[in-house]
Amino acid sequence: MVVTARGEDSWQGTEARDLDAFLADYCSERQTLSRIVHAVCALCGNGAFHVLVDDAEGVAGRVCLRCGDRRWMLDSDVHAAAARPVEAACPCGGEVFDVAVGFTLGAGGLVSYVHLALRCLSDGTMGVYADWPQDTEPPPDLLSRV
């Protein structure tokens, strides 16, 4: 694992687990990060994805690079009708990512906030591409829907 900060808002990593340190730092002055879950394709076990995001509507989806499986992430299926997601892209132009979601848990252990972090497979740049409060009671399987 090699995580380096490049300037205030730009981090580099060499593997998916580097997103853990990145998310911990990102959340250190915002919310208390309770858990991080990495995306893995349920069909083929791959960890590289194209990612679609509409941060305003709280929607994210992923497409497996290996098998093409498409999934809404978290509870995005509930909000997808009103969303206009766009494909995430790194400043370098890369569009394939490792994906991790950081969760903040509130009262009663319910998810109160989510942070979608991506690591570009082209140049290793990491960033938070979306984060939003969980305004409604999340489904019980939310943490498994990354």
Image (cartoon, rainbow, N blue to C red):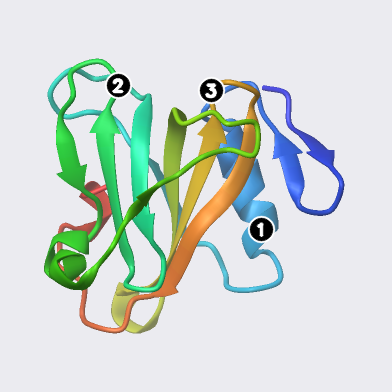
Residue 48 position within the rendered picture, expressed as x and y whole percent measured from the top left = 38, 24
Residue annotated with mark 1:
26
Residue occupying image coordinates x 55% and y 34%: 119
| Tag 1: amino acid | Tyr
Amino acid on which disc 2 is placed: Leu
Q: Residue furthest right?
A: 7
Q: Name the residue under label 2.
A: 65
x, y percent for residue 122: 58, 20
Q: Is residue 104 left or right of 135 when viewed as pictured?
A: right
Contact flag, marks 1 and 3 (Cβ < 8 Å) = no
Residue type at mark 3 is Leu
Image quadrant in which the N terminus is located: top right
Q: Nearer the viewer, mark 1 or mark 2?
A: 2
35 and 79: which is toward the camera: 79
Query: Which residue lies at the image location 73% right of the left edge and 31% below the top edge?
Result: 3
Location of residue 30 (image quadrant):
bottom right
Q: Residue 121 carries which label?
A: 3
Counting residues from the start of the chain, the first of labels 1 and 2 encountered is 1
Tell me: 52 left or right of 14.
left
What is the crowding at mark 1: few (fewer than 14 residues within 10 Å), some, or many (at least 20)?
Answer: some
Q: Residue at x 30, y 21 (%)?
A: 65
